[in-house]
């Protein structure tokens, strides 16, 4: 299968760890040039160094994408360095420390969650669109979540933000198809990122279990719908993202690909 990605410029947000890091690695394996951004400079530089050692041309731009000026700086830096952006991966997001019932959440917690999970994608997409329109080519993949389709009762703000990402994906796919821009989403279920690993270690310690036992207990008690019986690996999510950005998915737009181990039961 020909992905036809070699030499393409790919901008990946939230690339310093977890799914974002795996996405950057997967595009590097396809011979892409990379612009990566994240808030933490040290972790971002470590990813950039790793990719550079593998022969990938990388631009690392530390940035907090909840701030409009920093999002603009990222896109401007990428265009100045590479002269084009062919692929945008909107991967910034997270529930933070505010998992709670609806009646416990404040307006500020809602604002912070939407600012982290929705507006970075809005900002980066708006900023890269002119360049993609000029070249009459673009691929945008938004990282959503199964929570946007199958909501958890204790994360209503996060669920709503991820549902908005899926809706935005469909809207953009219709609005910019005539410009040669394809827009899709990927919705992972529980994925074995550093954050999830840390949570499972805490559960294991609190309950006197091994990591393996804590993982099995968590899945049984809180994620029984994942019929494959395990978390996703970041590389499994990244593989679908790369496919959607590639020539192999040239007739796919407005789709939401679930990488959820069978968790979402709806058709």
Image (cartoon, helix red, strand yellow):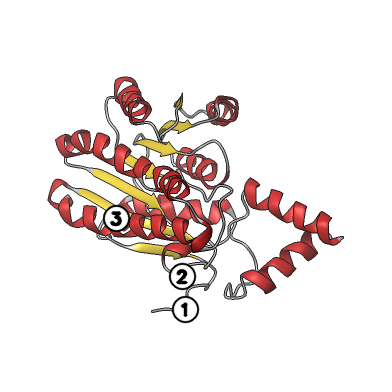
Could you tell me which quadrant the N terminus lies in? bottom left
Q: What residue lies at 67% left-to-right and 69% top-to-bottom?
A: 219
Q: CA distance from mark 1 to mark 3?
A: 21 Å
Residue furthest right in the image? 208
Which of the labelled discs sits on residue 169, or is there none? 3
User: How many numbered circles are shown?
Assistant: 3
Q: Residue at x 33, y 41 (%)?
A: 87
Q: Measured from the top left, where is residue 84 in percent x and y?
A: 27, 30
User: Which quadrant holds residue 122?
Assistant: top left
Image height check: is 53 above or below 165?
A: above
Looking at the image, do the residues carrying marks 1 and 2 touch, with CB atoms under 8 Å apart? Answer: yes
The residue sitting at 51% across, 48% down in the picture is 94
Residue 56 spot, x, y in % from top left: 48, 29
178 left or right, relative to 172: left
Q: Secondary structure at mark 1?
A: loop
Element assignment for label 2: loop
Kind of element beneath mark 3: helix
The quadrant the C terminus occupies is bottom left
Residue position for label 1: 265
Residue matched to label 2: 150
Q: Position of residue 59 (x, y in %)?
A: 44, 25
Question: Which of marks 3 and 2 precedes in the sequence?
Answer: 2
Within 10 Å of disc 1 (Cα), the crowding (few <14, some 14-19, many 20+) is few
Which mark is on residue 36?
none
């Amino acid at each position: 299968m020909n992905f036809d990605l070699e030499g393409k410029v790919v901008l990946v947000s939230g690339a310093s760890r977890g799914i974002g890091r795996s996405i950057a690695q997967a595009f590097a394996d396809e011979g892409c040039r990379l612009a990566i951004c994240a808030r933490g400079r040290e972790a971002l530089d470590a990813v950039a160094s790793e990719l550079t050692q593998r022969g990938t041309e990388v631009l690392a731009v530390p940035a907090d994408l909840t701030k409009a000026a920093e999002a603009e700086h990222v896109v401007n830096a990428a265009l100045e360095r590479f002269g084009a952006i062919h692929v945008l991966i909107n991967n910034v997001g997270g529930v933070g420390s505010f998992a709670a019932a609806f009646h416990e959440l404040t307006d500020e917690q809602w604002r912070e969650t939407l600012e982290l999970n929705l507006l970075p994608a809005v900002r980066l997409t708006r900023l890269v669109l002119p360049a993609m329109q000029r070249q009459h080519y673009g691929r945008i993949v938004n990282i959503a979540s199964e929570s946007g389709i199958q909501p958890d009762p204790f994360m209503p703000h996060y669920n709503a933000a991820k549902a908005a990402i899926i809706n935005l994906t469909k809207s953009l796919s219709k609005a910019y198809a005539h410009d040669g821009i394809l827009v899709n989403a990927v919705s992972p279920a529980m994925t074995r990122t550093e954050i999830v690993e840390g949570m499972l270690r805490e559960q294991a310690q609190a309950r006197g279990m091994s990591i393996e036992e804590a993982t099995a207990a968590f899945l049984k008690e809180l994620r029984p719908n994942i019929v494959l019986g395990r978390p996703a690996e970041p590389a499994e999510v990244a593989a679908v993202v790369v496919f959607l950005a590639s020539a192999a998915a040239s007739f796919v737009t407005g789709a939401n690909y679930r990488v959820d181990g069978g968790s979402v039961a709806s058709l």
